[in-house]
Image: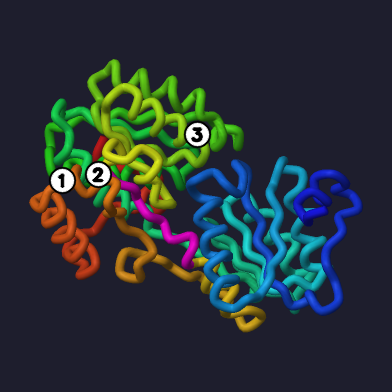
Amino acid sequence: MTLMKQFLGAAATLALCTGAAFADPALIYDLGGKFDKSFNEAAYGGAKKWVDETGGSYKELEMQSEAQREQALRRLAESGANPIVMTGFAFGDVLNTVAPDYPDTKFAIIDMVVDQPNVRSVVFTEEQGSFLVGMMAAQASKTGTVGFIGGMDIPLIRKFACGYAQGVKAVNPDAKVIQNMTGTTPSAWNDPVKGSELTKAQISQGADVIYAAAGGTGIGVLQTAADEGILSIGVDSNQNYLHPGQVLTSMLKRVDNAVYEAFKAGDALEPGIHVMDLKADGVGYALDDNNAALITDEMKATVDAAAAKIIAGEITVHDYMSDNTCPVE
């Protein structure tokens, strides 16, 4: 029986490997599932890279409900797993409570800052990557109207939306950016049917390129965009392969690198805030055989020039989370 099945089948008596496996790192996926083809799957990719390079093993858990967060962290810590990496801002409050009880265990949390001496907080400049794909959307759009569909309506996802809108407007100040969020609860990350409905609604308003930052919900966005003959933009993982020739690009959020680096550091993981920006290859855009025909040399040159200016500090992309406002609509 796998660790995940043990957890789901008998959460109160979760059995974890002990003995020689005490030093194994651990990875806890957020709601939406390990193979969401997006955020969680990117985390898995980092763990897999570490395994492929080292031959090591690790523990993993998939969250099925909010109620499991604290128990999962405590069980893993008590098993000796070190470090313990978790994906998602929703672990923030729980980790702030749990981390002090296990001072010898190192934790890493992605997308939230937890100020504890044994916690690494990994944050990304999603606005920078979203700015670049927004520029691509504006260049590819024939209607001058593009869309954004987010998952749970939280400041982090508004950060994606704002950066995207800024990139669109940098290319075409007159462009229209339609924005919708899927919901206000964690279920918003795994509702491809709602994603499809929102996509059709945006298409009816003239959108011909739609960027999805919605976890598993985004799969419905990309599928419907392909079915309706418009372009989409993927997120977190490279999703170009899902609909070759119809996904304009994907905004890469290198969650895989964050997990890989934490696993590689082991119990020597350094705490504090770890920023993964464009300069550190923490964000970017995907170009491969699946979308090469969609990206002209001019489009690539324009976006790459903007990326260089962002890295050099010549272009500053507004961070929505700094004051919960966006300079463009």
| Residue type for callout 1 | Ala
Give the mark nearest the N terminus, 2 or 3.
2
**Relative to 17, residue 320 above or below:** above
Q: Residues within 10 Å of mark 2 (few under 14, many from 20)?
A: many
Number of the front mark, 2 or 1: 2
Secondary element at tag 1: helix
Residue beneath the point at 29% across and 52% down:
318
Q: Is residue 239 above or below residue 255?
A: above
Name the residue tied to disc 1: 170
Q: On the image, numbered disc 3 is attached to which residue? A: 217
Residue that carries the numbered disc 2 in the rendered image? 134
Q: CA distance from mark 2 to mark 1?
A: 9 Å
Residue 42 % position (x, y): 50, 55
Q: Which residues are magenta?
A: 249-257
Give the alpha-carbon distance from disc 3 to disc 1, as whole Å. 28 Å
Say whether residue 53 is visible: yes
Whole-percent x, y for residue 95 in the image:
69, 60
- In depth, the one of 134 and 249 nearer the eye is 249
